[in-house]
């Protein structure tokens, strides 16, 4: 009974259309940073704590649930040691290239974002423990998720069963 | 290694679906025979993935046909048309 239910879930996840997978990937990757941004915003406003809590849990839950779906969809296909056929290997390689492009873009944006105010505007950019903690936790959770998200992003819709 | 079909790339036409159906094979059967995932067979049949030379040759070997009988850069003429149309129709049909 439980196995049949698990198979139904697997089948549902395996057949997710690409559009839905892309939405899940975006939600998963933005949920956690969104939670930190929301908390930082909340500190500057008079929004009651009763609203802060549910929104925070919703954003964390989005990353958590999205990650589980993405990992389940991709399984071991993002793993470099997995036994894949030529099409799957090629998709995985394209996903890795996409990850590299996304990470290098983020890194360049971060360097420019810190560099311009420091070098040209003479401002001092300070990173306190909260910001470093947020960056560290987001990187720890999201960087390992990136290959699965990239693969879910580029994998075409599965052919209909005939 | 093969390449997933991009819009800018030419589509490689194939007769995999016809040959598979003709032999009463499921996608899984053909995938097992060729050593690929069953979804890869679906992508190949839909022309959404161009196989590597190795995979094309394995398919040709499996079906016992020349590779150009299975894969072509130009659309295939339907087999029924090849068999029953044209000047040699009556002779072909008689056999």
Image (tube, coloured by chain):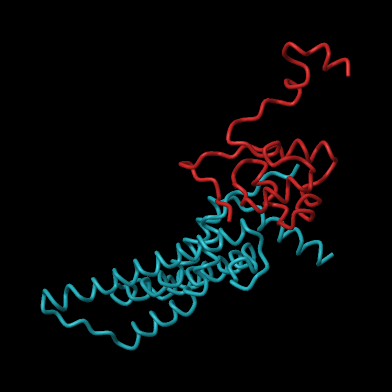
Chain colours: A cyan, B red
Q: Left or right: where does residue B59 sit relative to residue A75?
A: right
- Near-viewer residue (B12 or B53): B53
The residue drawn where x is 83% and y is 44% is B25
Residue B82 is situated, as x and y percent measured from the top left of the image, at 73, 22
Q: Quadrant of the C terminus of chain B?
A: top right
Q: In this picture, is A83 found above or below B36?
A: below
Q: Left or right: where does residue A103 sit relative to residue B40?
A: left
- The count of marks equals 0
The residue drawn where x is 57% and y is 50% is A156
- Near-viewer residue (A96 or A153): A96
- Near-viewer residue (A47 or A64): A64
Q: Quadrant of the N terminus of chain B?
A: bottom right
Residue A110 is situated, as x and y percent measured from the top left of the image, at 29, 73
Please tell me in which quadrant of the rendered image residue A34 appears: bottom left
Q: Left or right: where does residue A4 sit relative to residue B69?
A: right
The residue drawn where x is 47% and y is 69% is A59
Please tell me in which quadrant of the rendered image residue A91 appears: bottom right
Q: Residue furthest right?
A: B95
Q: Left or right: where does residue A30 sit relative to residue B10?
A: left
Please tell me in which quadrant of the rendered image residue B70 appears: top right
- Near-viewer residue (A86 or A30): A86
The residue drawn where x is 65% and y is 29% is B76
Residue B32 is situated, as x and y percent measured from the top left of the image, at 78, 56
Residue B46 is situated, as x and y percent measured from the top left of the image, at 64, 41
């Amino acid at each position: 009974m439980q196995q049949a239910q698990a198979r139904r879930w697997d089948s549902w996840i395996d057949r997710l259309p690409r559009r839905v997978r892309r939405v899940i990937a975006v939600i998963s990757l933005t949920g956690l940073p969104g939670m930190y941004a929301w908390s930082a915003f909340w500190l500057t406003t008079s929004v009651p704590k009763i609203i802060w809590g549910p929104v925070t849990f919703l954003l964390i839950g989005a990353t958590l649930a999205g990650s589980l779906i993405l990992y389940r969809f991709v399984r071991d296909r993002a793993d470099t040691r997995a036994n894949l056929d030529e099409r799957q290997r090629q998709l995985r390689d394209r996903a890795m290239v996409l990850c590299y492009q996304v990470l290098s873009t983020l890194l360049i944006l971060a360097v420019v974002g810190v560099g311009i105010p420091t070098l040209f505007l003479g401002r001092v950019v300070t990173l306190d423990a909260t910001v470093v903690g947020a960056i560290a936790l987001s990187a720890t959770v999201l960087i390992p998720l990136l290959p699965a998200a990239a693969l879910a992003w580029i994998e075409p819709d599965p052919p209909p069963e005939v | 290694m093969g390449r997933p079909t991009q819009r800018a790339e030419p589509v490689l036409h194939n007769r995999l679906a016809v040959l598979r159906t003709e032999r009463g094979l499921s996608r899984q059967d053909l995938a097992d025979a060729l050593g690929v995932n069953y979804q890869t067979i679906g992508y190949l049949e839909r022309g959404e993935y161009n196989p590597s030379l190795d995979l094309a040759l394995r398919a040709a070997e499996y079906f016992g046909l020349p590779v150009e009988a299975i894969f072509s850069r130009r659309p295939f003429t339907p087999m029924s048309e090849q068999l029953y149309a044209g000047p040699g129709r009556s002779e072909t049909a008689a056999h």
